[in-house]
Amino acid sequence: MRIITTEGLLFCIGFLCFCITTLWGVLAVILLNKRQQTERQKTLEKNIVRALAKTFDQPKNESAANFVWVKPYLTNNAKLWLLGKVLIKVNNLLHGTKPEAVSSFSDAIGLTAIIKTKLGSTDWFEKVMAIRLSHELGLKQHLPEIALLCAHENTFIRRESQIALVVFLGWQSLVLLSEYNFPISQWQQICIIKKLRKYYPTVDRASIGTAIEANNHNITRLLILIIGHFSMHQYNTYLRKHTNSEEEGISDNAYQSLHKVGYNSFDTWVELCKRNKSTLSKPLPIS
Amino acid sequence: MINKRILIVHEDPCVSYFLEHFFVEPTVSVQIESHYADVVKAISKEPFDVIITDLTINGNFTYRYLESLREYAPATSIVVISEIEFNGTKDNLIQMGANDFVTLPLDLWGFTKKINRLLCA
């Protein structure tokens, strides 16, 4: 059996102390960096928000020379996305007062042109961020480039461009979506309904009628949810038709939407019974 | 000389900085806070004429926050801003002591008029 000498023990303790001190040192540096980064982010947010607020007081946009301080943020991708994030926040805050304020600011600082070049990037993440910034900041001039990406092989690019389509074209975009043979995710459905509520609160019956007639099973669930959210009781036949659906979740959504458009569960059940005797064995939906 | 004071409370500094711009005047001072403990400290130090606050902030529960705000500042006008609105939210908040409830996105001109009216009251 090997015996550890006093020197060996002291060396081990010393080495352990060194490791622990180094670890604490690294952690301290990381924390300090993080704090500095947060401070820098706050300062940037403050500067952008104040510059944007000033544009509200003046009838005309300030000249590009006044936004020189923003230029360094346009060269670095991480800072560019941060700038975009702040602009989205301000746009959401002000949408009701001056919807074009943020897009004008974006034009003045040269962000719009950069976003346009990013739309042509080969990196999928850059492309997705550029599409997102385009629709969140209301850069409608990018619609032709974005429309081409709606059937892209990359799921993230395709989904973000389809949301952009809804933002720019409103209810008419449902007609276009009914022509694509790609499934629409639940997250996408929620986004589309939110965008329609925010930008196009008035229902366009002609467009939703055309989308229903297209009979594309990829957007069935989306249409059912939209009918429910906008309380379009004239489409209850469509909802009732899908209460018998075998596809997972569609039947539940159809029942929920029927409830939202004013049909209570008992009425729905009675109607189903009248139409098809076999539904008598089906349990009553919980409302 | 400054004779009116506004306190803006929001978790997101972007919102606070933006609103601050529209209320700062030679006679009006604006203070920004984002945490409940700092809000209590600020109110205890010197009273405010108007408090513009988000419905929920760090450090307290939604409705309890508003109740304690009313306790600490009984004479101050409180305007709550929020993105969330359920049925009866406004009535509940007014019962709890808020003077008004405004949903986002803001109608900025209408909102500034509202705050100026409360400052002059």
Image (cartoon, rainbow, N blue to C red):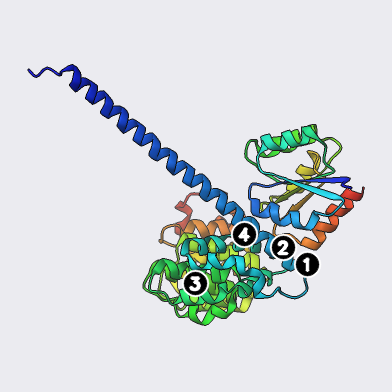
x%, y% of residue A95? 69, 65
Label 1 close to label 2 by CB (< 8 Å): yes
Kind of residue sitting beneath label 1 = Asp
Q: Secondary structure at mark 2?
A: helix
Chain ID of residue with mark 4: A
Give the class, few, some or many, for how many residues have Cα within 10 Å of label 4's Cα (few <14, many ≥20): some
| Residue behind mark 4 | A89
| Residue behind mark 2 | A53
Residue, far bottom = A144
Q: Which mark is residue B79?
A: none
The Cα atoms of the two marked residues, 3 and 2, are separated by: 31 Å
x%, y% of residue B75? 86, 37
| Residue behind mark 3 | A162
Answer with mark 4 or mark 1, whichever residue precedes in sequence: 1
Q: Secondary structure at mark 1?
A: helix
A185 in relation to A280, above or below: below
Q: Quadrant of the N terminus of chain A?
A: top left
Residue, far front = A7
| Residue A285 is at least partly visible in this image | no
Answer with mark 4 or mark 3, whichever residue precedes in sequence: 4
The Cα atoms of the two marked residues, 2 and 4, are separated by: 13 Å
x%, y% of residue A268? 57, 57
Chain ID of residue with mark 3: A
Q: Is residue B117 left or right of residue A214?
A: right
Chain ID of residue with mark 2: A
Chain ID of residue with mark 1: A
Kind of residue sitting beneath label 2 = Ala
The Cα atoms of the two marked residues, 1 and 3, are separated by: 36 Å
